[in-house]
Amino acid sequence: GLVLYEYRQGLTRAILGTAQPLGFRAVLLGIWDPKKDDEIKGVAELILQFHYTLALAVVIGNEGLIDNRYTIEDLQRAAVKLRSLLPATISVPFTTSEPIGEYGLKELREFGDFLAPNIHPAVDQENLDPLIAAEWVKRRAQALAMVGKKPVLVKETGIPNGGTWGYTPEVQQEFWREYRKGGPFVQTTGTSWISYAAAFEAFDMLWKAERTGLPIESHWGLLDAKRRPYPAFEVWQSAGKE
């Protein structure tokens, strides 16, 4: 599967058109700015075109509440708009995504069909042992599933492969190896479940550190900026054979 973050005219359509022939079965579409009707309309058009061949869901916004880029009301309006552009016969689940600490907000937990938190020990629990960090992420996800009473997809987590002391490709690999133990899916009570199936992120993006001034932001990849694999990539290669 693929996790996307925004809609770009032409480019996103090309990604989905290429994904299915390459063997991808699911895409988590993204709307970066829920206040932009063009993004909402574009995602709706993609759903109409590709829902026959791909399992689709939509993340409306990413970390925009904590960054004050939009409000919960903006998310709700975007969801209504998206639904209005789709026939009743097409049911595509939607959600939004925020850092785990924001989910104390009741309105956030109530928004959408499932919860997609970003749970980053490297941000909230710096320099944890990678094995402890992986367990910490799972505990936070489990607590959210219990309180939110909805399915939970951990959309982002991980350990950087560099950028500051203590983070190396080998430490990153240890985290993912521990995180993957027990499999990608855990059934909780009732209709709720937790998915640990998302890998963050595909490759290093150097512009992130340039924009934020935080060196670790360009070191989240399973591959480097030239698409060469780090040791952690092997963990996910093995997972694909399970």
Image: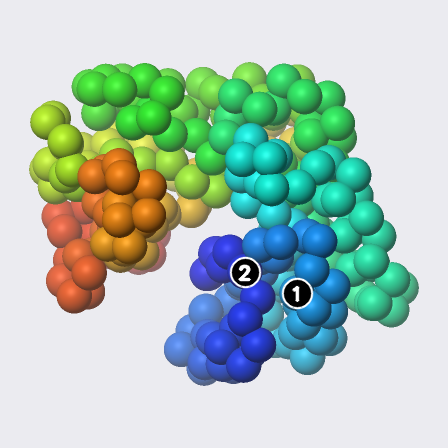
Mark 2 — residue?
Answer: 6
- The x and y percentages for residue 189 are 66, 24
Taking depth in this image into account, of 176 and 218 the one nearest to the observer is 218
**Quarter of image, res 149:** top right
Q: Is residue 189 visible?
A: yes
Give the residue type at disc 1: Glu
Give the residue type at disc 2: Glu
Element type at mark 2? loop
Mark 1 — residue?
Answer: 39
- The x and y percentages for residue 216 are 23, 38
* Labelled disc at residue 108: none
Mark pair 2, 1: CA separation: 8 Å
Measured along the vertical axis of the image, is residue 201 above or below residue 180? below
Q: Specify few, some or many for label 1: CA neighbours under 10 Å numbering under 14, 14-19, or 20 or more.
A: many
Q: Is residue 51 visible?
A: no
Element type at mark 1? helix
Callout 2 touching callout 1 (CB < 8 Å):
yes
Q: Residue drawn 58% across and 54% down?
A: 32
